[in-house]
Image (spheres, rainbow, N blue to C red):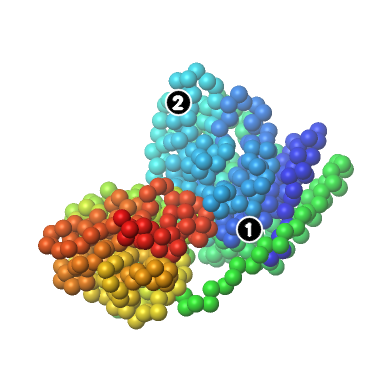
Amino acid sequence: MKLSYVESKYFEELLSLEINPILKNKLISDMCRINILYMICCAGSGHIGSSFSSIDIMNWALGELSKKYEKLYFFSSKGHDAPALYNSLIAYGKLNFSLLNKLRKIDGLPGHPDINTPNIFTNTGSLGMGISKSKGIIKANRLKGLNSKVIVLTGDGELQEGQIWESLNRVSQEELNELIIVVDNNKFQSDRTVKITSDLGDIENKFKSFGIETVSCDGNSVEEFSKAFEKIESSNKPGAIIANTIKGFGVSFMHGDLLNEGEFYKFHSGSIAQEIFDKAILELNNKISKSINGSKIKFDFKLSFYDLPDIAKNNNIQQNLLSSYSNSIVNEAGKNKKIIALDGDLILDTGLIEFEKKFPERFIECGIAEQDMVSQAGTLAKEGFIPIVHSFSSFLTARPNEQIYNNSTEETKVIYSGFLAGLLPSGPGHSHQAVRDIASMSGMHNLEMIQPNSEKQVEKLLKYSLESPNNIYIRFCSIPFELPDNFDELSKIRKGYGNTISDGKDICVITYSPTILSEAIKSKSLLLKNDINPKIISMPWLNTFDNNWIINELNNFHLIIIEDHYIEGGVAEKLALAISKLDLNIKIDVIGITEVPKSGTNQEILDYHGLSYKKISEKIMGLIKT
């Protein structure tokens, strides 16, 4: 792929010019938009629409507003507009330009902001926390006797999170006049409009009701934004700016306001094809040239080019559990009218588009409000329905954990479908990597945890989940993965039994994640060269183990359990407890995650955390020697 970008010297030259600040911001923002596209295409993923809607505000804050204050804190609470934030920091010399092609690389910039990156002072990406974090910053600086200004940028969809409204309660009462909240009101969340997902109503008056000085403006016009900012400053009160922006602003065909009601927005996340990239760059380049020529400033501007190597296609048979789940839940709902699907603003990522089309009366969109969603599910279950709750595992098992426990104490039955489970994909970073979900769901009353390892297993485990009297947490891998040779074995399910994928002797490797299973199978070829022939078992049951299976399949083996999770609180602890109750000769070792997971390419992260097939084989050989 042939990519274009703007070199750092042009930002430096533009910043040195004595020109109208609004014109300067416009030029810098469009130059940043070019580099945002470049950055996301190099990474293969990222959020274009939200980055484009917020870049004008970010550049004004980090450029003009930073000159006004002794100590300015500016950060994005939503976090997924990280490509915009990084490019703004790069433009103003606060991040090294060499990081431009290092988005979502282990030695570069994480998918969501993290404090290990220079000039990032708080982790974001988990929605709803930004205003609370701002309050803590203000109070800390007051205790230190320092004057500060805190500007926090939130998304409009983010306002559906309950913590937002908790955080506003005492802002006026505590006279937190150092705080200005900026809402990037681009009218979209994920792939759909806020209005369709969970309408926020009159945002301006909601903020005003908390005693906060609130102004609305065109957020993509820094002239209007600066006036709104000055109005709030003169009030000497905590403030909020409802910045009415356009998702994808700056490239006409990416503008969210062009969509018809109910259409999905195409540029929320992910990379783009060469044709779309070229079309966008041409438009941005022409806009920049027109602004330069129209203002008659002396500024030479040229694009640079980079040939991005093509990623080799994997021609091995791949499984896609998301599509299998989408088909399976529609099939089961067609047979059982008690099935209700609840979604937390992730209809595309949880495979529910067809369900909504076919059973709109049984589809409940809750927006970014996991606690509300889970409690609704609880009373739906009390009334005799079978609710299936959907979100990313990292959000579903953490935010509404107390609500899940409350549901379990009511002796009802709820199914929790968690996607993006495990270490991979690793690009988004630790806010989205569900590597503590098994621990979070442990101790729930009457809850079984399962993880399918093939498309066929998805179908069978969903059917099992619907028939079981217990609550169920289904842990889904969201990325395609390779199939083992012994694929038929993975289509079988028997409660508490693992699937033996490859026979062996002395050593038995157990894992439950399809991506880690693929690595474990590949590691066997290396181990065989060292006269080690491990038995490999895929375990779809995460907290239920049959005693007969343990005795017949695991006795007299050196058991090595590979976690797609922190070692602490993972499956190994549960299996070890089950084994300890039996009089067996089994040695147990565990391989897994022992630190906060890194952001990077999938291969980089597997290697770093010791879960690639080469690292697994090395660790197994080391464990055998000891």
Q: Which amino acid does label 2 sit on?
A: Lys
Question: Residue 559: x, y in percent?
Answer: 27, 63
Left or right of 498 on screen, residue 302: right
Looking at the rendered structure, which numbered label has been put on residue 139?
2
Query: Measured along the vertical axis of the image, is residue 78 above or below residue 309?
Result: above
Question: Residue 20: x, y in percent?
Answer: 78, 36
Q: In which quarter of the image is the C terminus?
A: bottom left
Query: Measured along the vertical axis of the image, is residue 238 above or below residue 424?
Result: above
Left or right of 424 on screen, residue 388: left
Specify few, some or many for label 1: CA neighbours under 10 Å numbering under 14, 14-19, or 20 or more. Answer: many
**Residue at (53% x, 77% y) in the render:** 315
Looking at the rendered structure, which numbered label has been put on residue 509?
none
Residue 399 in view of the camera? yes
Closest to the camera, between mark 2 and mark 1, is 1
Question: Residue 55: x, y in percent?
Answer: 64, 46
- Between the C-alphas of marks 2 and 1, the distance is 40 Å
Left or right of 312 on screen, residue 572: left
**Residue at (48% x, 47% y) in the render:** 125
Compare residues 179 and 126 and report the one nearer the observer: 126
Which image quadrant for residue 57? top right
**Residue at (58% x, 48% y) in the render:** 108
Which comes before the other along the chain, label 2 or label 1? 1
Question: Residue 603: x, y in percent?
Answer: 50, 61
- Element assignment for label 2: helix
Q: Quadrant of the N terminus?
A: bottom right
* Residue assigned mark 1: 42
Left or right of 536 on screen, residue 192: right
Query: Measured along the vertical axis of the image, is residue 418 above or below residue 492?
Result: above
Specify few, some or many for label 2: CA neighbours under 10 Å numbering under 14, 14-19, or 20 or more. Answer: some
Compare residues 401 and 225 and report the one nearer the observer: 401
